[in-house]
Amino acid sequence: MSSILQYTELYRDNAELIDKGSAPVLNKLRRQAFETLSETASFPAKHTEGFEKTSIEDLFAPDYGINILRKNLPVNLAATFRCDVPRMSTLTGFVVNDAFIPGHDIERKLPEGVIFCSLAKAAEQYPGLVEKHYGRLAPAGDATVALNNMLVQDGVFIYIPRNVIVERPIQIVNIFSSPIPLMALRRILVVAEQGAKASILVCDHTNDTTQNYLSSQIIEIFAGPGSDIGFYDMEESSPLTSRYSRLFASQQQDSRLLVDGITLANGKTRNDYTINLDGPNAEAMLGGMAIGSGNQHIDNNSQLTHTAPYCRSNQIFKYILDDEATGAFEGGINVSHGAIKTQAYQSNRNLLASQGARMHTKPQLLIFCDDVKCSHGATTGQLDQDALFYMRQRGISEKLAKTMLMQAFMADVIETVEMDGLRQRLHHLVEKHLHGEAAFCSDCSFTGTDHDIAPNPENSNE
Amino acid sequence: MTPENKKADKTGNDNAAVIDNATKSDYKYGFVTDIDTDVIPSGLSEEVVRLISAKKNEPEWLLEFRLKAYRHWLTLKMPDWAQLDIPPIDYQAISYFAAPKKKDSPKSLDEVDPELIDTFNKLGIPLEEQKMLSGMAVDAVMDSVSVKTTHREKLAELGIIFCSFSEAVKDYPDLVRRYLGSVVSYRDNFFAALNSAVFSDGSFVYIPKGVRCPMELSTYFRINASGTGQFERTLIVADDDAYVSYLEGCTAPMRDENQLHAAIVEIVVEDHAEVKYSTVQNWYAGDENGRGGVYNFVTKRGLCRGDYSKLSWTQVETGSAITWKYPSCILRGEGSVGEFYSVAVTRNHQQADTGTKMIHLGRNSRSTIVSKGISAGSSQNSYRGLVKVAPDADGCRNYTQCDSLLLSDHCGAHTFPYIDVLNDTAIVEHEATTSKISEEQLFYCNQRGIPTEEAIGLIVNGYAKEVMNKLPMEFAVEAQKLLQITLEGSVG
């Protein structure tokens, strides 16, 4: 029996309740999603091409609770939120399980016209704007998208009007906090109008490392003509947390999109990045890095599609896997007919640091146009013995030498990060990780010069 | 022979007699007899499998093998994961035992398609061979018969066995039984199961210990290679320290009546032995609009069983409407070596999804993959390959390079490498590029008085050289010409 059934039954029995806790724009998609799911035999499983290493069916099979009653679970944000990046004052919002809580005085700090608020609230206030974009990129016929469409009640909405430059990074902190196993349906909708510019940082955390959590997250990004968006997705959850996050982006003419997916601590993670270059002369940069130890399972899947001519894309994915960690990567470059002068590159490099670690990689090129330059490269191996020897000769201990080489290995992904504070923090975190220390943000001190990111404790008791 | 076997054999003979009677009479039992050869009516059932086995006077164990395969095949569905658009195949519409000499086969070369003759002449194929290739009756030909006999004598002296599969089953049942299905099990895949159930004939090669085969073994020179049918089965065994180079196919376009080809090639390489397997495939690819053409769905796999054994696949694929095959190496022996060199050219509406698998099980095993795809017209050309390193296989090394060249704006070139590394001491590298012929190179050639079409031929040959160099000498020359001819007129 497929695990879909438990979700369709839940919806059938509680449709009204789910509608009540959400907004009409979101509710509109539920019925169709329910029908799609009812006709689907199962979620993608190991025998489905593209899901060989991560069975979504198994991921969604356990009986998690879903907070359809919209109960506010008590969480002390001040205690939980430690994702502090020094020298970076962010505009912060929190997603506790699946409910959005704005940071202290956030609305006053936002530049004029910029919207950063709860998706359900935005759907009430700006129904036209939300409806025009909500669910337009994520394919409704897909089973896991349908699941999210059917059950999601809230999320985050970010809107940047024409030619507005948001100087301070926007930060979304996803926190799991629940005394029982919980599944959170998360949604992020980003709309950047022509010439807009912003950086968005999403951090995943768990408050309680003894509970099983599952997140189903869908991110939709509309990058308008000439817009410039940086999107950083950092996961530092717990070994019992599973996550299936899917990002869908559409880029218009001359736009620039940078997506970085960073996995430092997690249980089982599957990330999908679907980026379409729909307008000419657009540029996409997709970076991914994963440092896995213990039983971590990290599966990244990227599909970059060039539908318009004169676009450029670049992908770099790097993995360091230790202990019994499993890494998987599937990356596609798709060039449609007519997308001439495309330049698309992809590189996936992996280091296996222990006997039990394993890596599965599957780079792909699908080219339907002749006037292109596309390439991909993939390597899996271990550290250069000559380099190690060189360093040991000069009196550097083996452990330190290894750490230094691994840090250097990861550097070119970290260097794609355009937020100075985050980049430095990442260098630091990677170093700590490689030293074998638990490099959670919690170990980092609040050394930031700007303390206004500390949330208002009042929010935590809502 | 045990009494049981005798009994089976007798019933087999009886069956054969009954069938002979039946097939020779007119429509009495619903058999098609308008062609003067052995034909079983189309359709596949357990009866048909028994019939094929009986017709070939096969021993009981082989019949059992076929039946097991057939029963397993029934449980399978045709896979659909390939980057191919395959029209549905009606397996009941195929006749599973036919080596038909069609009545309408051309009587003389005048009746043969002039375009075909033209191609023959360009390739420099002797007239007698042209006749054979264009499907004429070849009973009275040819020089190569004597060549064949002399070759045979020489081979026999060395103890090398090179004969048809059916002969091998009769003469060397122990060897065949030992190795049949040991590399490609009947449970392997849909087409492997089908082939195992109904395979018609093929080649068997055995190189004894320490023998270096002095000549290239080629199916082309063996008389019974013609008409091996659509479900060919090849088994090559190289015993310790042996060496053999085996050639399959030929550069000339083959006239072929069978649309579906589902062959199996199994190779076993023992300690320190080496096998080189070269293929040039140029079957009918269908017309310009993609009508007709052969489906080439082949399972080819070699097992490097012994330590320091080596298996090298080289293929030049220019024919077939749809090519779907992955010649593979299972590198089980310590320090064993697998190589795969491929040039696949597609044009018009051809489709190819081809590549290799390198499965590293032995310590310090090494593999190299070089794949060059060239797509023209409205064709689709995919490389798909697997490199897998098992947890216990320390110190493995793989290098993969696959390049695609696009010659028109309607074609597609795709790359799907799968890399599974379960051991931390392995080094696995993969790179792939896709591009079109650079304007600068063409311009350079034009400047020096080389017309564009010729220039493209030159550039493509240069591009494929890395693979061509791996072919045996005389093959390489032909293959080079073939490449040029294939691309003629298809460059836009």
Image: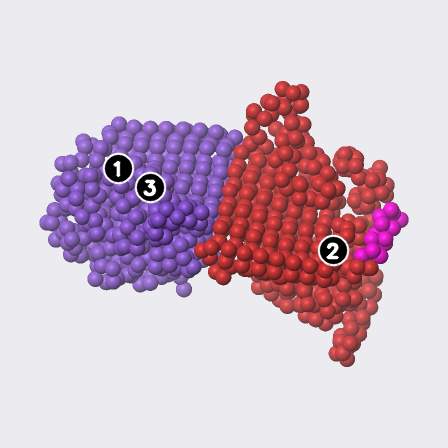
Chain colours: A purple, B red
Give the amino acid type for the residue marked by disc 3 in the picture: Ile
In the image, B342 versus B6, the foreground residue is B342
Q: Is residue B271 left or right of residue B256?
A: left
User: Which residue is the extreme one toward the bottom?
Assistant: B3
Please state the total of marks drawn on the protein image: 3
Q: Is residue B345 left or right of residue B124?
A: left
Q: Marks 2 and 3, how far apart in space? A: 55 Å
Q: Disc number at residue A420? A: 1
Is the residue marked by circle 3 packed among few (<14), some (14-19), or many (20+) residues within 10 Å? Answer: many
Residue B40 seen from this side: no
Is the residue marked by circle 2 packed among few (<14), some (14-19), or many (20+) residues within 10 Å? Answer: some
- Secondary element type, mark 3: helix
The quarter of the picture where the N terminus of chain A appears is bottom left
| Chain ID, mark 3 | A
- Secondary element type, mark 2: loop
Where does the image place residue B359, in percent across and percent down from the top left?
55, 56
| Chain ID, mark 1 | A
- Secondary element type, mark 1: helix
Residue on which the image places disc 2: B212
| Chain ID, mark 2 | B
